[in-house]
Image (cartoon, rainbow, N blue to C red):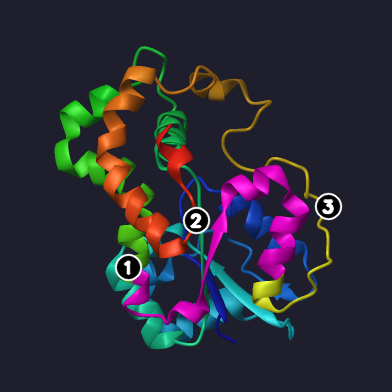
Amino acid sequence: MLPNFVHIGAPKAASTWLWKVCGEHPDIYVPEAKPVNFFVGEYHNGIDWYESTHYGTWNGERAVGDLSNGYMVYERALERCARHLGRAKILMTVRPPIERSFVHWGHFMWRRKFTPEQVMSMEQIFKRGGFLHFMLWLGPSLYAMQLKRVYRYFPKEQVKILWYEELEEDPESFLADFFGFLEVDPNFRPGILNRYVGFPSPDNPETDLLKRGIDPEMKERLKPLVRDDIEEFQEMTGRDLSHWLE
């Protein structure tokens, strides 16, 4: 059985939590490993390998998923998804772009186990890395650009935007919407409903570098870089996103 839904990103927008939620739902099958990222780094193994390796223990669950953040930012992965999973439902979870980029930066620094003296500020990263680092940290936050790419391969009725802010405000309603789109029991409530999963963990001292938040001056410098994309994404979704630039 191949997936009939794919969650393509964004990174640092609750994909690990969603994967664990899906693992608890009796009507949903997801691989034990996350992310799969087959259509990015393992495509050379072939679609039969993908099915047998990641979905070989499928047991009749109605919804079968692949949660892989790398697909959203890589057009070739989306083209491959469409080629093999053309009728699959596509989901994106988005959060305020600068906030997402900041958490992404923090996760990278934490995973590399840098000492406080080794941690590079976001400002240092942008100065030293140029376009490459701009696309690494801010690229996944340019949702209009990503969504236009998705629409080149999947019709709009197959695509669902999920809002991280709604998850924070009301996880039950967020999940009911998510489950409804997948056409599984929308009333199921997982054991991790009100638990934080992934990075940053509130009880992990290694995430202290995020507690002070992004430098206000740096935030002001980043706003012009995402403004046009936010305004376009606002038009595409019909949702007021002006607070993303506050």
Mark 3, residue position: 191
Q: Is residue 129 above or below residue 149?
A: above
Q: Is residue 31 visible in this depiction of the protein?
A: yes
Residue type at the position of mark 3: Gly
Q: Please tell me which residue is depicted at 63% across the width and 59% down the height of the picture.
A: 19
Whether label 3 touches label 1, CB < 8 Å: no
Q: Is residue 121 visible in this depiction of the protein?
A: no
Residue type at the position of mark 1: Lys
Q: Is disc 3 surrounded by few (<14), some (14 to 19) or many (20+) residues within 10 Å?
A: few
Secondary structure predominantly adopted by residues drawn in magenta? helix
The percent position of residue 135, horizontal first and vertical second, equals: 25, 46
Mark 1, residue position: 148
**Residue 190 figure quarter:** bottom right
Q: Secondary structure at mark 2?
A: loop
Q: Is residue 57 above or below residue 132?
A: below
Task: Estimate the spatial distance between the alpha carbons at disc 3 and disc 1, rounded to whole Å.
Answer: 35 Å
Q: Secondary structure at mark 1?
A: helix
The percent position of residue 231, horizontal first and vertical second, equals: 34, 51
Where does the magenta region start and end?
150-179
Q: Is disc 1 surrounded by few (<14), some (14 to 19) or many (20+) residues within 10 Å?
A: few
